[in-house]
Image: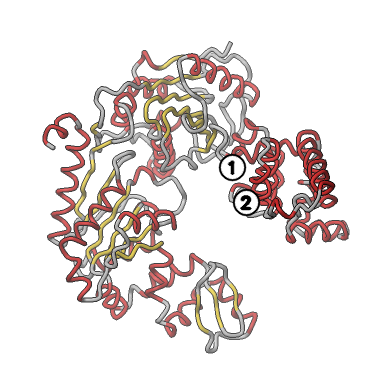
């Protein structure tokens, strides 16, 4: 073991952090484990839970107590449960599930607190008064029935914070959960975090609180970000098990207060910057796009750099390489589904497939056509939901072949509406009821009714678009392309990462961020600086071996000097796409 630690500096750093964390747990001190990118945060969380299982498990079971492990996704919850073998002393749950389990029995208090939530008050007033209705929470949508009032996800957290001011509620919480661990603490609801600090950490009463995460990986608007208190022991996990030294060196220069040790000191990698300052044409203007290359030129620069990196040995298959871009608008332009993106008001309708058309075309039509084209007919019928054996005769089989050939060909030449119309005719595959209902409404609606309905307006604009855009969108959603947004790549890792740093969103200005580094921002601009810094750090830290940055935004001398300080002058160059 000692020989391994000598060869692996990251293991040495990780062991130091684990020892500090174990001491805090044994001494019942609340702590914050700050684990930078690639440090193995989840591993530390699981080790903490395993220590408690081994040393305190039997006693906790006798007392009917558990360790609460709060996560922010069901996937993370399942992972913690799996890695602790479903031990009965560990209750892993999302923050909303955790809070609701504690709150739901306080019905009198809940009826009082819902009247402090404006959107809920409006719904209650529509039916008169609360009366004896039970307060419930299931799907996370506000609604009022004859017997129940259903809460929104956000309502649950607001009510939890309110009940935390009740001493009886706090005693019940502490008696059930003498320890509370929070995964990805930086994304914790700010009010909930403040309540934990005020009622437990500051008073040193109630449960031990253990925070696991990284304040530099807070990249969404919501969330507490960095959580500090004198009663919260800071433990820095100075390890990186992900990236080669060439990448970790850059991360350490960006973030010197949490220097990371690598796991493979001899690993080969690279970290380079390419900028477009030599461009002599007219750059874009305006708040969102000011200083960036025109769209066609940005595409030209990216295509040329991809060829250059491929010549150097980069594998641009989706599993090996990710190209990170700022917004879905930029990605859509690069991958040719811009018109579809322009139709739908909310991105989740596309990328989470909440729209029934999108869900059906991407999850059924596209895989069915792919299977048919590959001659995998059993797989095709499995996707469609029909057994091959139900084809009773040769004529029916011939009809299937004919109709599927028509569908496959129409996808490349026709519109989305023409594909939908063909499926209405052939029923191969059968259109979902939700799509058929919208089609019927759209066909029968007046212009005034269409104008008044967001769904009908969207589908009317959706149908005339080339189906080839839907195919491109499906490839992106199904991760068949090397592209992703910088936000979407959080938590992932790839052998090679190419980050395209341009404009497109007025919340981000890379030139300004580089000019302000380190901490030279105006007093009122701290939030903007941190937002840009964190996303830059998250994007760069996805790379395991090779990292390349392409700046399509023009950079000032001060911004370039910052990059030279991080990457070295030999690794910062003006890229010529010709």
Q: Nearer the viewer, residue 398 or 369?
A: 398
Q: Could you tell me residue 389's position as x and y percent? A: 71, 53
Q: Is 193 on the left-hand or right-hand side of 504?
A: left
Q: Nearer the viewer, residue 305 or 365?
A: 365
Q: Nearer the viewer, residue 318 or 451?
A: 318
Q: Could you tell me residue 496's position as x and y percent? A: 43, 27
The colour scheme used to paint the residues is secondary structure
Residue 353: give its label: 2
CB under 8 Å between callouts 1 and 2? yes
Asked if residue 43 is positioned above or below residue 262 in the image, the reply reads below
> Mark 1 or mark 2, which has the lower sequence index?
2
Q: CA distance from mark 1 to mark 2?
A: 9 Å
The number of discs equals: 2
Element under disc 2: loop
Q: Which residue is mark 1?
A: 477
Quadrant into which the N terminus falls: top left
Element under disc 1: helix
Whether residue 458 is visible here, answered yes or no, is no
Q: Could you tell me residue 391's position as x and y percent? A: 76, 52
**Which residue is rendered at x = 82% and y = 52% of the image?**
424
Q: Is 450 on the left-hand or right-hand side of 84?
A: right
- Quadrant of the image occupied by residue 251: top left
Whether residue 149 is visible here, answered yes or no, is yes
């Amino acid at each position: 073991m000692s020989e391994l630690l000598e060869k692996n500096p990251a293991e040495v750093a990780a062991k130091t952090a684990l020892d500090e964390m174990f001491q805090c747990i044994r001494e019942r001190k609340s702590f914050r484990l700050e684990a930078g990118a690639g440090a193995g945060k989840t591993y530390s969380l699981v080790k903490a839970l395993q220590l408690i299982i081994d040393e305190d498990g039997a006693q906790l079971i006798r007392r009917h107590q558990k360790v609460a492990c709060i996560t922010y996704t069901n996937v993370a919850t399942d992972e913690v449960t799996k890695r602790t073998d479903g031990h009965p002393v560990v209750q892993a749950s999302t923050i909303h599930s955790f809070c609701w389990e504690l709150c739901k029995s306080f019905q009198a208090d809940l009826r009082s607190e819902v009247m402090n939530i404006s959107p809920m008050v409006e719904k209650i007033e529509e039916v008169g008064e609360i009366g004896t209705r039970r307060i419930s929470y299931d799907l996370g949508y506000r609604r009022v029935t004859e017997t129940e009032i259903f809460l929104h996800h956000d309502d649950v957290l607001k009510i939890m914070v309110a009940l935390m001011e009740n001493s009886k509620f706090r005693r019940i919480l502490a008696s059930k959960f003498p320890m509370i661990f929070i995964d990805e603490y930086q994304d914790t609801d700010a009010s909930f975090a403040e309540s934990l600090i005020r009622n437990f950490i500051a008073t040193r009463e109630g449960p031990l609180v253990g925070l696991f995460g990284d304040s530099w990986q807070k990249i969404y608007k919501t969330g507490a970000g960095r959580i500090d208190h004198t009663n919260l022991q800071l433990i820095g996990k100075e390890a990186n098990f992900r990236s080669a030294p060439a990448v970790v060196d850059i991360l350490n220069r960006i973030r010197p207060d949490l220097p990371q040790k690598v796991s493979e000191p001899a690993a080969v990698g690279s970290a380079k910057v390419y900028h477009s300052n030599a461009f002599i044409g007219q750059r874009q203007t305006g708040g969102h796009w000011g200083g960036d290359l025109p769209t066609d030129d940005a595409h030209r620069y990216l295509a040329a750099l991809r060829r250059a990196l491929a010549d150097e040995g980069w594998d641009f298959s989706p599993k090996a390489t990710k190209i990170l871009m700022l917004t879905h608008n930029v990605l859509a332009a690069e991958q040719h589904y811009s018109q579809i993106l322009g139709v739908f008001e909310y991105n989740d309708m596309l990328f989470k497939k909440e729209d029934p058309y999108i869900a059906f075309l991407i999850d059924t039509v596209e895989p069915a056509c792919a299977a048919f084209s590959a001659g995998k007919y059993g797989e095709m019928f499995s996707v469609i939901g029909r057994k091959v054996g139900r084809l009773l005769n040769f004529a029916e089989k011939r009809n299937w072949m004919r109709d599927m050939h028509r569908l496959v060909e129409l996808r490349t030449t026709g519109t989305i509406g023409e594909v939908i119309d063909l499926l209405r005719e052939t029923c191969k595959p059968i259109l979902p009821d939700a799509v058929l209902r919208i089609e019927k409404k759209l066909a029968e609606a007046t212009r005034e009714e269409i104008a008044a309905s967001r769904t009908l307006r969207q589908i009317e604009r959706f149908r005339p678009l080339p189906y080839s855009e839907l195919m491109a969108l499906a490839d992106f959603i199904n991760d068949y392309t090397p592209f992703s947004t910088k936000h979407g790549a959080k938590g992932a890792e790839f052998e090679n990462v190419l980050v395209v740093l341009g404009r497109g969103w007025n919340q981000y200005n890379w030139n300004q961020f580089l000019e302000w580094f380190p901490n030279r921002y105006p007093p009122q601009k701290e939030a903007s600086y941190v937002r840009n810094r964190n996303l830059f750090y998250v994007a760069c830290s996805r790379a395991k071996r090779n990292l390349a940055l392409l700046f399509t935004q023009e950079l000032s001398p001060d911004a370039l000097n910052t990059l030279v300080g991080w990457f070295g002058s030999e690794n910062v160059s003006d890229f010529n796409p010709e």
